């Protein structure tokens, strides 16, 4: 069975702006978010980004691969997981 591993390194350059959005979406005062240590803030933002990317990427990639294989006349069942 063929396996492909994909690794994404995502560098965020605007944590403060993203933190404000995060605060508003989670009903947190911006002042509270501003007082958080940078490492905590990055961890919160990063975990949300990873969660969203996994869902979107998994769905997109599986759909595209299934479509491509079907065009080649291949029937395949694709399972995906995350490390």
Image (cartoon, rainbow, N blue to C red):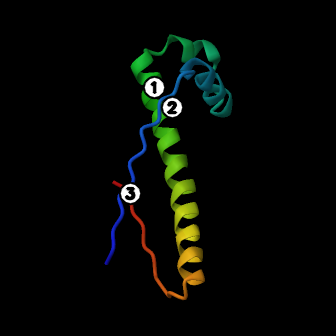
Label whose residue precedes the other's in the sequence (1 or 3): 1
Residue at 66% x, 27% y is: 21
The answer to whether mark 1 and mark 2 are in CB contact below 8 A is yes
Could you say which disc has been placed on residue 82 in the image?
3
Residue that carries the numbered disc 1 in the rendered image: 42
The answer to whether mark 3 and mark 2 are in CB contact below 8 A is no
Query: Horizontally, is 25 left or right of 6 in the view?
Result: right
Kindly report the distance in space between the C-alpha atoms of the residues bearing marks 1 and 2.
5 Å
Residue that carries the numbered disc 2 in the rendered image: 45
Kindly report the distance in space between the C-alpha atoms of the residues bearing marks 3 and 2.
19 Å
- The x and y percentages for residue 11 are 47, 30
Res 81 → quadrant? bottom left
Res 2 → quadrant? bottom left
- Could you say whether the residue bearing mark 1 is in a helix, strand or loop? helix
- Could you say whether the residue bearing mark 2 is in a helix, strand or loop? helix
- Could you say whether the residue bearing mark 3 is in a helix, strand or loop? loop
Label whose residue precedes the other's in the sequence (3 or 2): 2
Q: Residues within 10 Å of mark 3 (few under 14, many from 20)?
A: few
- The x and y percentages for residue 60 are 58, 61
Q: Residues within 10 Å of mark 1 (few under 14, many from 20)?
A: some
Query: Horizontally, is 51 left or right of 21 in the view?
Result: left
Front residue of this view, candidates 73 and 64:
73
Residue at 47% x, 83% y is: 76
């Amino acid at each position: 069975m063929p396996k492909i591993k994909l690794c994404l390194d995502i560098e965020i350059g605007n944590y403060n702006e993203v933190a404000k959005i995060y605060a508003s979406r989670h009903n947190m005062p911006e002042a509270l978010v501003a007082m958080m240590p940078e490492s905590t803030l990055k961890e919160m933002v990063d975990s949300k980004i990873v969660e969203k990317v996994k869902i979107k990427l998994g769905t997109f990639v599986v759909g595209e691969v299934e479509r491509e294989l079907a065009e080649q006349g291949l029937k395949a069942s694709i399972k995906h997981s995350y490390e």
